[in-house]
Image: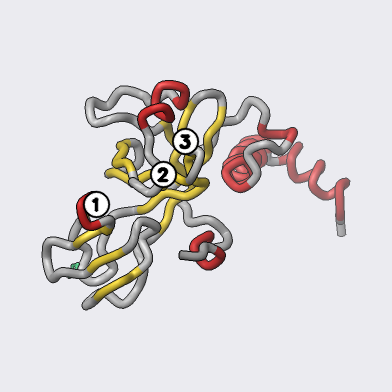
Amino acid sequence: MVTGTAGSLAIGLLFPTAGQSEEKVDLEKLCSAFPYNSQCENYLPGVRAEDSEEKPIEVSAFLPNAKAGIPVLVKGLPKVAYLVINEGPKIAEYGINPVCTHLGCTVEWKTERSRFECPCHGSHFDAQGRIIKGPAKRSLPLVTVVVKQNQIRLVDRKPAIDPRSTIKN
Ligand code: FES
């Protein structure tokens, strides 16, 4: 039986294509969770966030217009996501997937009331996507956001730990 590093090397030599694709998947996982890991210097996970005209967003142009507490709708994933803007302003490492957890309608951010509202049956969610009022019972799902090389990258995967569990109101 072949074990450890010797085993991995042997499998890599026998199945180079499988090994390469596995390496890519691992980098995607590693670099979306730890974008500043030394192995991720040249790797940009996910897809680039775009504005409403589908132009790639540059962080240097975006941040001066961003306001803490006001989520910003961007394109890039199959549909859209909201970036969460923290004090600074700073782009949070997670974004909000605006699909209502009740029956799947798309929620909308309402600045005048500082909350997401679902147009179908009236569920409300706060600026971090946490449930305020039903009939939905769960908070909005999250995506991972990586800010790197003047780009905003959206990764269609929730963060390993829900960052909202540590946020105080
Ligand atoms: Fe959003 Fe029903 S789908 S409240």
Q: Quadrant of residue 67?
A: top left
Quadrant position of the N terminus in the picture = bottom right
Task: Answer whether residue 169 is visible to the viewer in this image.
Answer: yes
Q: Under 8 Å from ligand 1: the CB of mark 1?
A: no
Q: Residue at x 12, y 61 (%)?
A: 119
Q: Residue at x 53, y 34 (%)?
A: 147
In the displayed structure image, the side of residue 41 where residue 49 appears, left or right: left
Q: Does the residue at mark 2 contact the one at mark 1 (Cβ under 8 Å)?
A: no
- Crowd tier of the residue under label 1, counting other residues whose Cα lies within 10 Å: few below 14, some 14–19, many 20 or above: many
Residue 152: which numbered mark, if any? none
Q: Which residue is mark 3?
A: 153
Residue 68: which numbered mark, if any? 2
Q: Amino acid at mark 3?
A: Arg
Q: Which residue is mark 1?
A: 109
Q: Amino acid at mark 1?
A: Trp
Q: Amino acid at mark 2?
A: Ala
Q: Earlier in the sequence, mark 2 or mark 1?
A: 2
Q: Position of residue 164 (x, y in %)?
A: 49, 63
Q: Residue at x 60, y 30 (%)?
A: 43
Q: Residue at x 40, y 22 (%)?
A: 61
Q: Earlier in the sequence, mark 3 or mark 1?
A: 1
Ligand 1's image quarter is bottom left
Pick whichever, 63 or 47, lies toward us.
63
Which element is circle 2 on?
loop
| Nearer mark to the viewer, of 3 and 2 | 2
